[in-house]
Image (cartoon, rainbow, N blue to C red):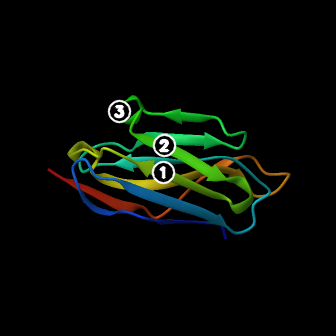
Amino acid sequence: QVQLVESGGGLVQAGGSLRLSCTASGLLFRIDSMGWYRQAPGKERELVATRSSDGSTTYADSVKGRFTISGDNSKRTVYLQMESLEPEDTAVYYCNAAAMRTIMSTARDYWGQGTQVTVSS
């Protein structure tokens, strides 16, 4: 059973900061990337940031310069440091991992249960 366990969400005022963490557990042969998506009420889930196993990163334009993704491959953990938060950042944030369970399997997406981030104005 593969699990992604998130932590660090909460309520913060506009301009504040939060740090999200996500750790993958279970039988996994290889993790190709880990990252964060978010879904606000009435909107589709969208990419926030991803980090590949080689350390390369991708960010949504809306968070560039404010959010930083980092990780520790040996710990199967990814972090999202969020600065200068805006009310528009309010959403449920989901951890994602693109991974292979065995050497014979194909890579697929795994998802965490989500953590709420609320930014008040």
Mark 3 or mark 2: name the one nearer the start of the chain: 3
* Secondary element at image label 1: strand
Q: CA distance from mark 1 to mark 3?
A: 14 Å
Q: Are marks 2 and 1 in contact (CB under 8 Å)?
A: yes
Marked residue nearer the N-terminal end (1 or 3): 3
User: Viewed as shown, does residue 47 lie left or right of 24?
Assistant: left
Q: Give neighbour class at mark 2: few <14, some 14-19, many 20+ (Cα, 10 Å).
A: some
Q: CA distance from mark 2 to mark 1?
A: 6 Å
Hey, what amino acid is under mark 1? Leu
Query: Circle 3 sits on which residue?
Result: 62
Residue 89 location in percent, x, y? Answer: 29, 46
Q: Residue at x 48, y 48 (%)?
A: 36
**54 and 33: which is toward the camera:** 54
Q: Residue at x 67, y 59 (%)?
A: 76
The amino acid type of the residue labelled 3 equals: Ser
Badge 1 is on which residue?
A: 80
Q: Percent from the top left, x then y, of residue 97? A: 61, 52
**Residue type for callout 2:** Thr
- First along the sequence among labels 2 and 1: 2
The residue furthest left is 121
Residue that badge 2 annotates: 68
Which disc is residue 67 wearing? Answer: none
